[in-house]
Image (cartoon, coloured by chain):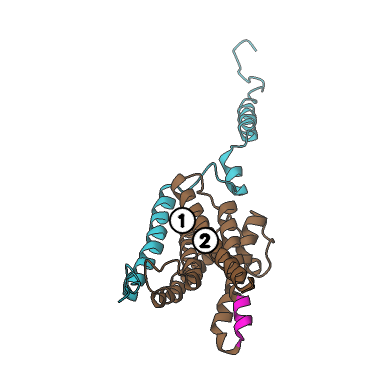
């Protein structure tokens, strides 16, 4: 009598269990990534950076001077007038 | 407004990773059907069932990834960009690879649904496009993915590529060995 080579029984025989395993792997990576992405909205060292985000991140230096200029103009406008001759009469005149 | 923009951005990233993982499992189980790579895990019938079932996972995730990017104001992907690759201004090459991958996946899916009206050779030729689709999807993730600086995300991405690469290499080796044994004179 010779021993026939026995095939090893696989770990999971239920197809339902296999489907659950595949779903668990996929959904855990999806869920984990959702949590990670919500905690790290912007990656500054990402290979691609959106142009709009870079533009808004650096403030424009020209606005400060514009404000200063407009302030100066406003101050100058308020001073002027009161140069009319005094019309006060005395007994001597 | 900010919440919606952020939510779209979060969804675009998480569905991208989720669909890549599901696609990896699908490719792995597909190769394993011929090589018996997962014989230790399950019998071939089980692997076949999972291979078919995985479409239920990666199709919605992939679709959600595309839809989220259509609404993302930074990516600025339009409907036309889903048909014509390399047309976007943001990450032209990287996003274009994603478009190519999506188109190839659609071809593979349609050929699978039309399997009864195709010859075995035709169906195999179409189905092998899934390897190219996977490579394009992986390159799309590596080149445009914004989270690869994180070691866990990077490890996940490279593990998917290594797993498919190793199993595919195993299949090629088996094919070569089989060809050699048949060519050897008796």
Q: Is residue B102 visible?
A: no
Which chain comes out cyan in the rendered image?
A
Rendered image quadrant of residue B36 = bottom left
Which chain comes out brown in the rendered image?
B
Q: Earlier in the sequence, mark 1 or mark 2?
A: 1
- Residue hosting label 1: B10
Label 2 neighbour load within 10 Å: few <14, some 14-19, many 20+: many
Closer to the eye: label 1 or 2: 2
Q: Chain of mark 2?
A: B
Quadrant position of the C terminus of chain A in the picture: top right
- Residue hosting label 2: B164
Q: Is residue A72 visible?
A: yes
Q: As rendered, which of B25 and B180 lies closer to the eye?
A: B180
Local secondary structure at mark 2: helix
Q: Chain of mark 1?
A: B
Compared across the picture, whether B156 is left or right of B169 comes to left
- The residue lying at 44 percent from left, 76 percent from top is B48
User: Magenta segment: does it hold B122?
Assistant: yes
How many marks do you count on the picture?
2
């Amino acid at each position: 009598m010779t021993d026939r080579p026995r095939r090893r029984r696989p770990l999971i025989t239920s197809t339902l269990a296999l489907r659950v395993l595949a779903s668990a792997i996929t959904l855990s990576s999806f869920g984990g990534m959702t949590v990670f992405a919500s905690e790290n909205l912007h990656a500054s060292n990402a290979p691609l950076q959106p142009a709009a985000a870079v533009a808004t991140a650096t403030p424009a230096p020209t606005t400060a001077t514009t404000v200063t200029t407009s302030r100066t103009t406003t101050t100058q406008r308020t001073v002027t007038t009161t140069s009319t001759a005094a019309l006060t009469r005395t007994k001597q005149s | 407004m900010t919440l919606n923009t952020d939510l779209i951005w979060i969804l675009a990233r998480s569905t991208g990773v989720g669909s890549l993982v599901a696609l990896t499992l699908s490719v792995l189980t597909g190769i394993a059907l011929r090589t018996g790579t997962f014989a230790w895990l399950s019998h071939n019938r089980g692997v076949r069932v999972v291979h078919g079932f995985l479409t239920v996972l990666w199709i919605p995730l992939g679709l959600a990834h595309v839809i989220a990017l259509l609404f993302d104001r930074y990516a600025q992907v339009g409907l036309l960009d889903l048909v014509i690759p390399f047309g976007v201004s943001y990450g032209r090459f990287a996003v274009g690879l994603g478009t190519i991958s999506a188109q190839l996946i659609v071809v593979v899916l349609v050929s699978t649904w039309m399997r009864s009206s195709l010859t075995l050779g035709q169906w195999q030729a179409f189905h092998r496009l899934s390897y190219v689709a996977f490579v394009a999807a992986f390159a799309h993730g590596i080149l445009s993915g914004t989270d690869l600086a994180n070691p866990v995300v990077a490890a996940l991405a490279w593990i998917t590529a290594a797993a498919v690469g190793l199993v595919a290499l195993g299949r090629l080796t088996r094919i070569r060995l089989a060809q050699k044994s048949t060519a050897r004179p008796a």
